[in-house]
Image (cartoon, rainbow, N blue to C red):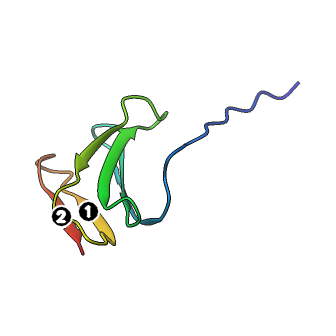
Amino acid sequence: MIAINCWMVVEIQEVNGLSVDVAAGHIYWTDAQRQRIEMSDYDGKNRRVVIHVDLLTPRAVLVDAVDGLAIIFTI
């Protein structure tokens, strides 16, 4: 028997950017339709909105893996 792990991500409309913080085990993404940047753990747990104010169409996201603090994005 083969075991397969599957995750279902809901309430995401248009992902244009994706970044992985390997050190912290987080995934960050932009959602241009919902005008926000979100993150979660690798397994989809602890999902939360990181930025949602004054974003028209966020297109790319880059996480500073060294400092773990800066989130750089384009709109």
Is residue 73 or residue 14 the one in the foreground?
14
Query: Which residue is depicted at the point 30% across and 57% down?
Result: 36
Q: Earlier in the sequence, mark 1 or mark 2?
A: 1
How far from the left and from the top, in percent, is residue 68? 16, 46
Q: Residue at x 67, y 32 (%)?
A: 5
What kind of element bears circle 1?
strand
Q: Which residue is mark 1?
A: 62
Dot 1 amino acid type: Leu
Residue 17 at x, y percent in the picture: 38, 66
| Side (left or right) of 13 relative to 75 | right
For this rendering, which residue is in front, 51 or 71? 51
The answer to the question of whether label 1 and label 2 lie on touching residues, with beta carbons closer than 8 A, is yes
User: Does 6 sit left or right of 51 as displayed?
Assistant: right
Q: Is residue 24 left or right of residue 5?
A: left
Q: Give the quarter of the image for residue 52.
A: bottom left
Task: Say the numbered circle drawn on residue 7.
Answer: none
Residue 30 position in % (x across, y down): 35, 60
Please, which residue is most extreme toward the right here? 1
From this view, report whether residue 28 is shown above or below residue 18. Answer: above
Residue 26 visible in the shown view:
no
Q: For mark 2, what is the residue?
A: 72
Quadrant occupied by the N terminus? top right
Name which residue type carries label 2: Ile
Q: Mark 1, residues whose alpha carbon is within 10 Å: few (<14), some, or many (≥20)?
A: some
Please tell me whether residue 52 is drawn above or below residue 39 in the rendered image. Answer: below
Q: Residues within 10 Å of mark 2 (few under 14, many from 20)?
A: few
